[in-house]
Each structure stands twice: as structure tokens, then as C-alpha cells.
Image (cartoon, grey):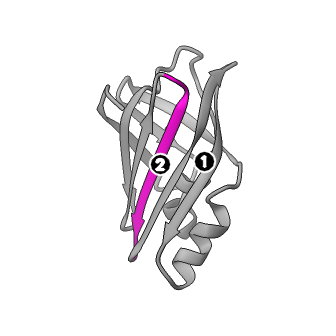
Amino acid sequence: MKTLRFLPLALLAFGCHSASVNMVGTWTSGLGGALTTYHFRPDGTFTVENLYAGTHALIEGKYVVEGGKLALTPSKADVQGEGPEADHIRSVAMQQSRVTIKEISPNDFQLGLESPPLMVHRMSPNP
């Protein structure tokens, strides 16, 4: 379960089922007490904000969808908080990783193969 709480911070490349995935908008996920909001903008930039156990993380960077993959490259990470959870978030905030993404509907995706899966929901088509 600990891995999934921080998975949104470590996501830097999703394997997509469709090359026509439109990621522009505001997305949210929550698992194990963590709340994560993703903002994907039309100009190819993103922001991820994560709140968990007294820790606030804000990650910014660029993304591109190509060849059925969403590749994210973080350029900045700001993690506020103390203790082991904050230290762990700091250690993964700028790392690249891969996770499978399965489209459930145009506004819902399942990330990862772990159980329970991390569900991501589009809250708005606007970033």
C-alpha cells in the first residue's frame, strides 16, 4: 500500500492503451489517505500536487504523449513536511518510472497492476 500512496509522485511514464489519449485537464486520485491532483496543460506542461500525512508536494515539468505512452519529465519539486513520509516523497519526486494505464472511460483511468489499483478521475477538461 505504501508504494501506491507515492506512485503518483513517481509516475513519469505511463504505458497507454490508446495513442489518442487526451490528458489535458485536471485529474485526481486518492488511495491510502493520499490525495493527488494532476494538471495537464495544452502547452505540454504539468503540475502534480500531493497531500499525505502532513506532507505537501508540488512537482512541475513537461509531458508528451507519443507512441501510446505519456512521458513526464519533472523540472522542479517542492516537498514541505518532515519525517519519513516526507523524506520518501523527496526521494521519488524527481525520479522517472513506468506504470501501466488502463482507460476505464474517457474520464477514468486505472494506474498500475497492483491491488487495489490506483484510479485517476478527470475533474475538469481545464487544467
Mark 1 crowd level (few <14, some 14–19, many ≥20, 10 Å Cα): many
Q: What element carries label 2?
A: strand
As drawn, which residue projects farthest toward the left? 124
The reply to whether the magenta stretch includes residue 51 is: yes
As drawn, which residue projects farthest toward the top? 20
Q: Is mark 1 on a helix, strand or loop?
A: loop
As drawn, which residue projects farthest toward the bottom? 83
> What residue did someone put label 2 on?
48
Q: Which residue is drawn at 43% across and 26% down?
A: 24
Q: Image check: 41 left or right of 9? A: left
- Residue 98: x and y, percent? 68, 44
Label 1 is placed on what type of residue?
Answer: Leu
Q: Earlier in the sequence, mark 1 or mark 2?
A: 1
Q: Image check: 96 left or right of 110? A: right
Quick check: can you spot residue 1? no
Q: Which residue is drawn at 46% across and 20% down?
A: 22
Range drawn in magenta: 43-53
Looking at the picture, tell me which residue is in the foreground, 23 or 4. Answer: 23
Q: In which quarter of the image is residue 68?
A: top right
- Residue 67: x and y, percent? 70, 18
- Residue 49: x and y, percent? 43, 54
Q: Are marks 1 and 2 in contact (CB under 8 Å)?
A: yes
Give the main secondary structure of the magenta stretch. Answer: strand
**Height in image: 2 above or below 37?**
below
Q: Which residue is drawn at 67% across and 55% down?
A: 94
The reply to whether the magenta stretch includes residue 23 is: no
Label 2 is placed on what type of residue?
Answer: Val
Mark 2 crowd level (few <14, some 14–19, many ≥20, 10 Å Cα): many
Q: Label 1 to label 2, Cα distance in Å?
A: 10 Å
Q: Residue at x 53, y 60 (%)?
A: 4
